[in-house]
Amino acid sequence: MEAAPVPLALQGSGRWSGVLWAGLRQNAALSDLHRGVTQALGSCGLKPERRRFRAQRPPGRLKAWLRTWRSLDSSPVVVDEFCLYASELTPAGARYRILQRYPLRAKVEA
């Protein structure tokens, strides 16, 4: 798969099943990359994750943090590679290891 570098900008934040998240502003390059990765995974027989988690009520301090950062907005940064990670759960916590790097390069017209 070939894809161009992707500009990413943070937009919004929230909480999902005990995890704090920051959203990404949609853009055409990000949508194209997502579509390409999804198609490549599908051709290998892998399907997108479909799990959903129950919403939990956040504690008071967390509610205040979420109110403060819900309209998070940043300038874009250009991402020129992404990585496939393996995670291993150990008694000391999760360990992550890069399995493969995927550089993003501008498409070359022939």
Image: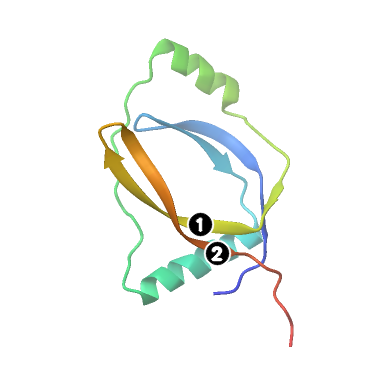
Give the crowd class for mark 1: few <14, some 14-19, many >=20 residues within 10 Å. Answer: few
- Secondary structure under tag 1 reads strand
Q: Residue at x 46, y 12 (%)?
A: 61
Q: Mark 1 or mark 2: name the one nearer the start of the chain.
A: 1
Residue 5: image quadrant is bottom right
Q: Residue at x 69, y 37 (%)?
A: 74
Marking on residue 83: 1
Q: Amino acid at mark 1?
A: Cys
Instruction: List x then y, in percent, for residue 105.
Output: 67, 68
Quarter occupied by the N terminus:
bottom right
Does residue 58 appear to the left or right of 69 in the view shown?
Answer: left
Q: Residue at x 37, y 72 (%)?
A: 42
Instruction: List x then y, in percent, for residue 85.
Output: 42, 53
Residue 102: image quadrant is bottom right
Marking on residue 3: none
Gap between marks 1 and 2, in whole Å? 6 Å
Instruction: List x then y, in percent, for residue 75.
Output: 73, 40
Q: Are marks 1 and 2 in contact (CB under 8 Å)?
A: yes
Q: Residue 42 or 70: which is nearer the viewer?
A: 42
Quarter occupied by the C terminus:
bottom right
Q: Residue 80 or 32: which is nearer the viewer?
A: 80
Q: Residue 49 or 102: which is nearer the viewer?
A: 102
Marking on residue 102: 2
Q: Residue furthest bottom?
A: 110
Instruction: List x then y, in percent, for residue 65.
Output: 52, 18
Q: Residue at x 46, y 17 (%)?
A: 63
Q: Amino acid at mark 2?
A: Tyr
